[in-house]
Amino acid sequence: MEFSIKSGSPEKQRTACIVVGVCEPRKLTTAAKAIDSASKKYLSNLIRRGDIEGKLGQSLLLHNVPGMLCDRVLLVGCGKERDLDERQYRKIIENSIKQLNTTGANDAVSYLSELNVKGRDHNWKISRAVEFTNHVLYEFKEFKSKNKRSTKTLKKITLTVPSRRELPSGDKAAKIGNSLSKGVKLARDLGNRPANVCTPSYLASQAQQLAKTYKTLKVKVLDEAAMKKLEMNSLLSVSRGSAEPAKLITFEYYGGKKDSKPVVLVGKGVTFDTGGISIKPSPAMDEMKYDMCGAASVFGTMSAIADMGLPVNVVGVVPAVENMPSSTATKPGDIFTSMSGQTIEVLNTDAEGRLILCDALSYSERFNPAAVVDIATLTGACVMALGSHATGLLSNHNPLAKDLLNAGETAGDRAWQLPLWDEYQQQIDSPFADMANIGGREAGTITAACFLSRFTKKFHWAHLDIAGTAWISGKNKCATGRPVSLLTQYLLDHAE
């Protein structure tokens, strides 16, 4: 999708469709009023007849509106003006794009970016409009033998600013939104690819391809022999049951000051999770291809910041494995020594994400990080606690947690903080090793984070559990690309 920014009155726009809002009850927005004036109350008369109330989700397509140079006018319901917040704005934009896609229009000029959203400036509205538009238009047809190409005709959208002086900042905001959209798309594509394609080796090759696209990205891939030398025995305990070799992928992006410590993002990359010897039940097991969405979010975020040329230093670390049952697989009760020197009793081989993350977190120490954020589809308990709306957040540093929460609010990719109290640590005590890899049924999300916290004593750290937010289940299953928006916004804020 091509985006551009312009200013000007709607009645002067030569385009296939102009998009304006109607608020509830039957209240024209500023741009709609301009059309109404040019058309000699054409819109007012329609509204008076009750053709559209302005409720959220409503729309009305008009052809040949008097006094207009455009082919069509699309009226979009915006709900009550006093309720217009980030969440409502997203629904308005997404509804407008869904309706536009059915009109046959090749291009459109949208005045919805001029709506008054509580506490948000014009740049926010433009960048989010670009992101929300691309989210709606996303399709994954790589493996379709027919209809691989989209039949949709919408190719270009122009977003408006109130005056010419906002054009430069509007252009910048649109570019940020477009870079973010590319990153989200990359994360969604990686997540949606099947596990027979998207293996640890495939992720490594995709990382190297990304480095060719962005010369500011440096990629390094460690094989199992190199990881064995580093004594990453916890990570390798997961891949030992699979014919697919594990990989440790590292991205380095240094766009900030040379003496500025990097933010390190660590993404769980289990490209398929059978549960190992503690095998999962078969219903919906196909969705375990999404167990690498933490890794995908690191790929997407690194892509977004490189595309923006963001003045910040960031390192991405992706431990990539496949968790399979076999004669060589880890058995419940086995004990391994992690890279940190701490020993782990594996009571459940389906709690494998933390086993690969702990060594990746120890590896992160070498980058002397300002902060480390890990992202993982880690616990079903998080889905039970927060559903699919919020990502679980736990941290050993409250200022870092607050920054991530604020970034999530700005991006509309929200997280919710859970406690990380010492009282929970005893649940993962083991009589045979320094710790067990599970802590029982109670507070499963918290005890998983407690496990990881034992490998993060030397830096500020936050853990994002995206088990409920990384993908949508059911007939329309699809990766969401979360939390690329949250992470990118956090890094944008960090750069400032």
Image (cartoon, grey):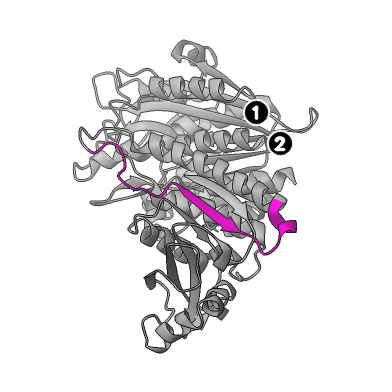
Identify the mark at residue 253; answer none if there is no mark: 1
- Residue 249 pos. (x, y %): 51, 23
- Amino acid marked by disc 1: Tyr
Identify the mark at residue 77; answer none if there is no mark: none
Mark-to-mark CA distance, 2 and 1:
8 Å
Give above or below for 66 relative to 168: below
Instruction: Using the image as rendered, state which of residue 212 and residue 195 is in the foreground.
Output: 212
Q: Tell me the SS state at disc 1.
A: strand
Of the image marks 2 and 1, the number of the one nearer the N terminus = 1
Instruction: Using the image as rendered, state which of residue 374 and residue 326 is in the foreground.
Output: 374
Tag 2 near tag 1, CB within 8 Å: yes
The answer to whether residue 284 of the structure is visible from this angle is yes
- Please give the name of the residue rendered at 44% of the width and 57% of the height, measured from the top-left corner: 16
Q: Would residue 156 be counted in the magenta stretch? A: yes
Instruction: Using the image as rendered, state which of residue 411 and residue 28 is in the foreground.
Output: 28
Q: Give the range drawn in magenta.
A: 147-167
Instruction: Using the image as rendered, state which of residue 440 and residue 23 is in the foreground.
Output: 23
Q: Tell me the SS state at disc 2.
A: loop
Q: Label 2: which residue? A: 312
Count of numbered circles in the view: 2
- Please give the name of the residue rendered at 29% of the width and 32% of the height, measured from the top-left corner: 194
- Amino acid marked by disc 2: Val
Q: Would residue 61 be counted in the magenta stretch? A: no
The answer to whether residue 434 of the structure is visible from this angle is no
- Residue 157 pos. (x, y %): 50, 52
- Residue 372 pos. (x, y %): 62, 38
Side (left or right) of 378 relative to 213: left
**Residue lying farthest to the bottom in this orientation:** 48
